[in-house]
Amino acid sequence: MGDNRLATRRIPSRGGVAPADARGRVVAMVAFRSREYLHQNPAARWMLGGAVLLCAVAFAAGGMWGEQGESATAWATGAVVVAAMTSLFWASLTVTVDHTHVRVSLAGLVRKEIALDDITAVEQRAYRPIKDFGGWGWRWSHRLPNAVAYTTRGDSAVVLTVRGGGEVYLGVDDEAALLDVLRARIGA
């Protein structure tokens, strides 16, 4: 049988050293992981449902009064738009903390990495998502200087203050666990 002791392996793309097993495969050292979905937000469900219904009615009405060729195009376009909007129900926000970074992924399309060394403070804070950021999702604040939010619901977030004075709002279910992990990692 092979040796199961942990070794380290240099990871050029990450610019550091990560734990690896005897075969050289990187071993994940995830201290915290949270996955939130947009469909968990009641307000987003109503807004998205209303938008899908409005699009369906608009495309149906447009397809009924157009020429025969235009009707098929309107229905196909409507189906694609409604399918795309419906897929937003399953958009997820994943927040992961490992031994070097806080990683945020929104719907797998928006990705952000924040080095733990760049975090100067962490706190839990109540905020007004619509007033401060214009809603939920990946948002820049129009009211708070240098603030960005990655949230799917709620009015409370873990706020990371990063070097240079910027703030990152992270909306997760278990804010206390995220705070504990981050405070232990950054020594706050």
Image (tube, helix red, strand yellow):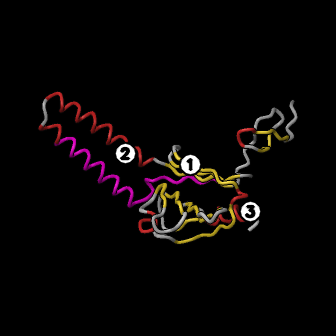
Q: Is residue 172 magenta?
A: no
Q: What SS does tag 2 mark?
A: helix
Report the span colored magenta.
33-61
Judge depth for marks 3 and 2 and give the one in front. Answer: 3
**Given this view, does label 1 or label 2 mark the residue nearer the observer?**
1
Q: Which residue is mark 1?
A: 105
The residue at the point 79 percent across, 44 percent down is 17
Relative to 185, does residue 86 appear above or below in the rendering?
above
Q: Is residue 163 left or right of residue 37?
A: right
Magenta: main secondary structure equals helix
**Residue nearer the viewer, 186 or 184:** 186
Which residue sits at x=71%, y=39%?
Answer: 13
**Image spot of residue 6 (x, y percent):** 84, 41
Q: Position of residue 60 (x, y in %)?
A: 19, 41
Q: Amino acid at mark 2?
A: Thr
Residue most extreme to the bottom: 126
Residue 75 relative to residue 120: left or right = left
